[in-house]
Image (cartoon, helix red, strand yellow):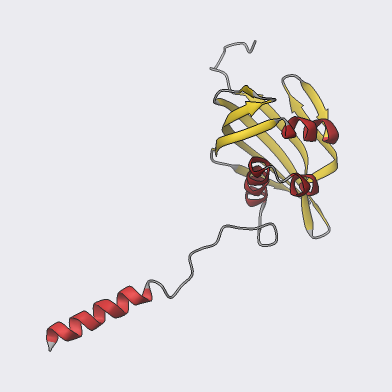
Amino acid sequence: MPKASALLLVVFLLDGCTMWKEKQSPTWSSATGAEQFERLLWQEIKARNWPEVEKRLGANLVVVTPNGKRDRAAHMEYLKGLEITDYSIGEMEVTPNGDDMVLTYTMTMQGTLKGQPMGAATRQMLSVWQQVGTNWIAVVQVWMPVTPEGQQRK
């Protein structure tokens, strides 16, 4: 009888493992912070879901890169030429500032830009998300290549 009791206990415990749903990845409607918004934005960019990306970029978006400044239209054109096959996001630091959230992190992405291989370049990223009503939109992004300390960028 003790073996049967032990077996029932094991079956009950194992069955209990399936009682709770797995933690779901956040969605735009369930996201609760700037880090989740930023990660969702990159998922949408990789998936090439342009209507969703456009909803998340502010009309006054400014993107700063080593090649200059882009407005929202120019940045959307750039993103549409980007085909991301893989990316990784380093640890994010979020700094709240009133109705804004400032994020900094490193990002490595692989893929193509206008059909040409990009290589696995690492970039230092900065994004500013601004609360507009009940939604959040990205209003500033900075993309800078990471270079060894003291080395000039070409």
Number of marks: 0
| Closer to us: 105 or 69 | 69
Q: Residue at x 54, y 38 (%)?
A: 90
What is the x, y in percent for residue 91?
Answer: 54, 41
The quarter holding residue 104 reads top right
| Closer to us: 42 or 62 | 42
**The C terminus lies in quadrant:** top right
Q: As drawn, is 149 to the left or to the right of 69?
A: left
What is the x, y in percent for residue 33?
Answer: 66, 54
| Closer to us: 95 or 41 | 41
Residue furthest front as drawn: 115
What is the x, y in percent for residue 114?
Answer: 70, 25
The quarter holding residue 118 reads top right
**The N terminus lies in quadrant:** bottom left
Q: Is residue 108 above or below residue 101?
A: above
Q: Is residue 64 above or below residue 53?
A: above
Q: Residue at x 75, y 19 (%)?
A: 67
Residue furthest right as drawn: 59
What is the x, y in percent for residue 53?
Answer: 75, 45
Q: Is residue 47 above or below residue 117?
A: below
The quarter holding residue 125 reads top right
Q: As drawn, is 142 to the left or to the right of 24?
A: right
Residue furthest bottom as drawn: 1
Q: Residue at x 48, y 65 (%)?
A: 22
Q: Residue at x 62, y 11 (%)?
A: 152
Q: As drawn, is 47 to the left or to the right of 51?
A: left
